[in-house]
Image (cartoon, coloured by chain):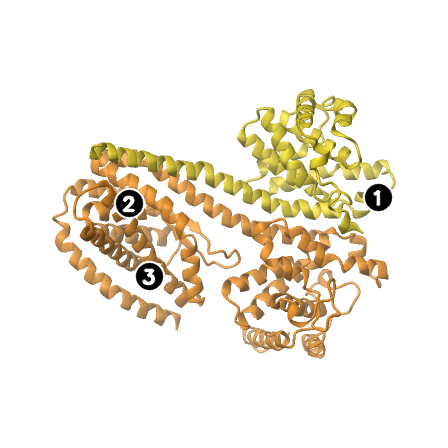
Chain colours: A yellow, B orange
Amino acid sequence: MSSFWLTIAIVAFCMGALGYYAFVVLPNQFHRWRCQSLRAFARAVELRTQGRFGSADLLAPLVNEVALRLGLPLQERRRLELAVYLRDIGMVGIPYAVLNKPTSLTPIERLTLDRHAELSAAIAEQIPGLWQVAPLVRQHHVVYAEQPEAPLAAHLLSALDNLLVHIQQGYTPEQWCEEAGARYHPQVVATVRAVCRERPLAESLPLHRSAALWL
Amino acid sequence: MRKRRFWYWIGLTSLPAGAILLAASDSLARVPAIETLFWLMLVALVAELFLVRYPLRHGYTDLGIWMSVSTPIVIATIVLYGWEAGVWMDAVITLVAGLANTLFRSTYPRWAFLNTVQSILSAFCAGMAVAGVDWLIAYESAWRYVLATGAALGAYHLVNSILISTNIALFEGVQWGWAIRQNLSAFPQEAMVMLLFSLIVGPLVKTFGVSGLVMALAPYLTLRQAFMLWTRQHDLYHQTIRSLGFLVQKAHPYTGGHLQRVAQWARKVAQHLGLPPERCELVYEAALLHDLGKTVLDERILNKPGRLTPSEWKQIKRHPQLGAEILSGTPFLVPVVPWIAYHHERPDGKGYPYGLKGDQIPLEARIIAVVDAFDAMIGGETPSQQRTYRKALSISEALHELRRGAGTQFDPTVVSVFEAVVGEWQREQQRLQGGVKR
């Protein structure tokens, strides 16, 4: 190989390696750091609400898998993962008594609790670099029948959040698809059904690992 | 004192730097392709002007260095045109960019001068490393170029790190060993990226001349992007700690000023106990987050004005464990987890939640325990910072209480060091307020 072509080969290799490092490895690493830091906030909120501990850690891989199957681009999947950790952060502003009321909530308490999505979005808007996640967080309880025009990512987050709550109450994913699933985006529900058919979801989720903390 | 130290240091380093510069100017005129060299210098100058801030893991002090992405261009120049061209190029761009920074970033001109001296010495050592490789591999080949670039970059970074660390140690009052460890810790990652860029610039310039520089624009921007992302990662670390601190304040407004004060006292005590600087910073961060577990508790219990019932007290006692649980999922905060979990343990084993004894409790947790108790006893300056269930004590009363509990409730060594720290602080306050006691 002539010196000229060897030079070109070295330059091309270095450019490729540099580009891969700066635009693939580092952004990935940065995203992981961001998720890990938001995990601390999510844990604080989850520990405050009985029976919710670990829900973000369970939801994040599930959301990612369904989003991947729905063909959502990488940027959108990253936004979704951040939204999973941020979605309930507004619960810090909701009174403990309302969050952990053993009986059903009064209409005023229900309204107070429903404010958490808005509060979470408001907090996300204040964090540098996370304002893009705020709309997703705001809509993380969106119902397809009421707002079909909401982005698919928001429908996905809302459906899977609800799925997790149902699984924690003893439902199977199939039952959720048949009953509650009707309220959510059909494409999302169909994908969840396909994922669950391939591997038993409920068995892979360590749902009761938080119990020891509340004894 | 610092100013005098500064001029001694400048004198010591500028003598060899001046001699190197003079020796280089002799052969500078003989450098071929002087026009290409000029353009290279211009590009390096632009890179030097657009600095990226690279914090040294401190979020609460101004420590940190401004990094430029001009080094790979200087290295490529040294390898292509010899150390003389590289030394002059680095000297000119560092001085011009440094003087520009005195205007735009309000830095002192003397720093521009010191940086220039350091650049000359670093570039000269890089040149010597290239000469060493030339001596080993006499014939022209692509591999000689790769090896020479690697050696030059390594030598440049090593000398530059030693000089910068000496600066920080002399003028910021931190330990030299710590500063150099901080400087070199990012080296493998940083060196790999810089080496790749140097390997791109050199052949492009050699093969295509000035137009090769235009082709190097894309990798230059890539390199900058890499630096920016590293910086953002560091910032994110500090942002997380600050935001978690705000979360605690939100849950329990009393803790607002309390956390800040405890964190500052704890850092001072750690410094007086001779812990390494990075450990002192971790103690600061742990103290800032030590009550994080309270965010989980019922605010009616936290803000209860009267005495707590046994079941309420049982809830409160869970907060160190809960705080540790919150942070244990975040790998970069894991070092502070045990200190937060054990900050209510006592040397006599009567603490909570685990009932650990003496040396079973980490020193950092013992520090937080002492300063936390002290600040809780003296309370804040405003009524909202006073505890609802207890009257605030004076500083001397609080210190007396600490002494009374030394050996049983508190670590006696930490208590005596803390007394010295408080004494120092009081003297400083008296000096500032013209002898008026708080």
Question: Which chain's residue wears label 3?
Answer: B
- Rendered location of residue B267, percent (x, y): 57, 66
On the question of residue B38 being in view, the answer is yes
Tag 2: amino acid: Ile
Q: Residue shown at 24%/32% (left/top)?
A: A5
Residues marked 2 and 3 touching at CB (< 8 Å):
no
Question: Which chain's residue wears label 1?
Answer: A
Tell me the element at label 2: helix
Residue A139 location, quadrant: top right
Query: Mark 2 or mark 3: which comes first in sequence?
Result: 2
In whole angstroms, how far apart are the C-alphas of marks 3 and 1? Answer: 65 Å
Tag 1: amino acid: Lys
Q: Residues within 10 Å of mark 2 (few under 14, many from 20)?
A: many
Q: Which mark is residue B73?
A: 2
- Rendered location of residue B54, percent (x, y): 44, 51
Residues marked 1 and 2 touching at CB (< 8 Å):
no
Q: Residue B110 carries which label?
A: 3
Report the side of B420 relative to B27 (left or right).
Answer: right
In whole angstroms, how far apart are the C-alphas of marks 2 and 3? Answer: 25 Å
Disc 3 versus disc 1: nearer the observer: 1
**From the image, which quarter does the C terminus of chain B lie in?**
bottom right
In whole angstroms, how far apart are the C-alphas of marks 1 and 2? Answer: 65 Å
- For label 1, the residue is A101
Q: Residue shown at 20%/40% (left/top)?
A: B36
Tell me the element at label 1: loop
Q: Residue shown at 55%/45% (left/top)?
A: A33
**From the image, which quarter does the N terminus of chain B lie in?**
bottom left
- Rendered location of residue B429, percent (x, y): 57, 73
Quick check: do tags 2 and 3 share a chain? yes
Tag 3: amino acid: Arg
